[in-house]
Image (spheres, rainbow, N blue to C red):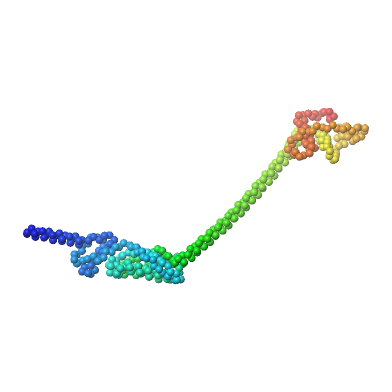
Amino acid sequence: MTQGQIIWLCVIGFFVLILLFKCIRVVPQANCWVTEFLGKYKASWNSGLHFKVPFFERIVNKVSLKERTLDFQPQRVITKDNVTMAIDSVVFMQVLDAKLFTYGIDNPMFAIENLAATTLRNIVGEMDFDQTLSSRDAINAKMIGVLDEATDPWGIKITRVEIKNIQPPAEIQEVMTKQMRAEREKRQAILEAEAHQESVIKRAEGDKQAKVLAAEAERDAQIALAEGKAKSIQLVYEAEASGLARLNAVKVEHSVLQLKGLDALKEVANGNSTKIFMPTDLTQIVSTLGVAAETMGIGDSMFAKKKPEPPKPVINDDCLERHESEISHGAAYAGAVFEQQVENNEFNAKQPLND
């Protein structure tokens, strides 16, 4: 074999290797390739390594099996109450059969767009304007059902449909704005009225509680004053009872008590009062003391003007007040002096009264 033949064999072998290398194909994941043999469908290659017969087989379509998003232009629709508006929708689809997708319809994306527009017009045409704004989920569900059924022969699965935007006319938007403003003002007025009502109720409850507490405080004060007065009266009577008990303890004679009674009468009579106090046993007292003639005015006794006695000191007696008369203070002073004499044992039962 000559050198020229060897070179030609090397060139031919090189081209054969390149051709064989070109016939080896690797399909990526989530893809499907449709092949034809001499112009007729042969197979759908899924992901992996495949060998194509050179010059006889060819790859017709490379289909992605991933879910796709189809964002179409806003479609103008008319509602049941003759309101024209633009609706923007989004369709999610996925190819399940690459053969049907390739041979089922020409330009399937354009077909889905037109099918979605017509379906949307049919659905919205059966609804009022307000119902259209508040029934997006219902519109989505109806569109999914119609589109999925229509695209089954094309090997396409409609997974989801969403209404992205609903744009009513300008005059409708203005009316809606006024309605929204009125609704908000209404809610504001209601909230202010409820707040005012609650504040009035709270204020009334507070006034009521304050009056109740004031009445309870007044009641407690009156009870405390009454208890204090009762305690003071009790202490006065206990003091009087204690004084009488002490007099009984020293066993003062009857004559001494009579003398103190006269002293008390003298103190009572020493004043400008027009009243005269006459004890029932005055005759017996005077006869006992031997001064009956002078006391009754019998005889030639001359009236002697009494010298003014020095003022008696004020005795701190719990039973007396500062506004009491001088007579009451005098009686209290006489009783105190007598009590002091009794405590000092200045009286002698055997001593005559004229001493």
In the displayed structure, 207 sits above or below 151; it is: above
Residue 349 location, quadrant? top right
**Is any atom of residue 247 visible in this view?**
no
In the image, is 82 to the left or to the right of 323? Answer: left
Quadrant (top left/top right/bottom left/bottom right) for the C terminus: top right
In the image, is 230 to the left or to the right of 189? Answer: right
* Residue that appears at 45% across and 66% down: 170
* Residue that appears at 30% across and 70% down: 105
**Is any atom of residue 111 visible in this view?**
yes
* Residue 160 x, y percent position in the rendering: 37, 64
Residue 276 location, quadrant? top right
Q: In the displayed image of the protein, which residue is found farthest to the left?
A: 1
Q: In the displayed image of the protein, which residue is found farthest to the right?
A: 300
**Relative depth, front residue between 286 and 335:** 335
In the image, is 151 to the left or to the right of 40? Answer: right
In the displayed structure, 145 sits above or below 305; it is: below
* Residue 90 x, y percent position in the rendering: 37, 64
Q: Please give the count of numbered marks on the rendered protein.
A: 0
Quadrant (top left/top right/bottom left/bottom right) for the N terminus: bottom left
In the displayed structure, 169 sits above or below 248; it is: below
* Residue 280 x, y percent position in the rendering: 85, 39
* Residue 231 x, y percent position in the rendering: 70, 41
**Relative depth, front residue between 323 and 38:** 38
* Residue that appears at 30% across and 63% down: 65
**Relative depth, front residue between 23 and 280:** 23
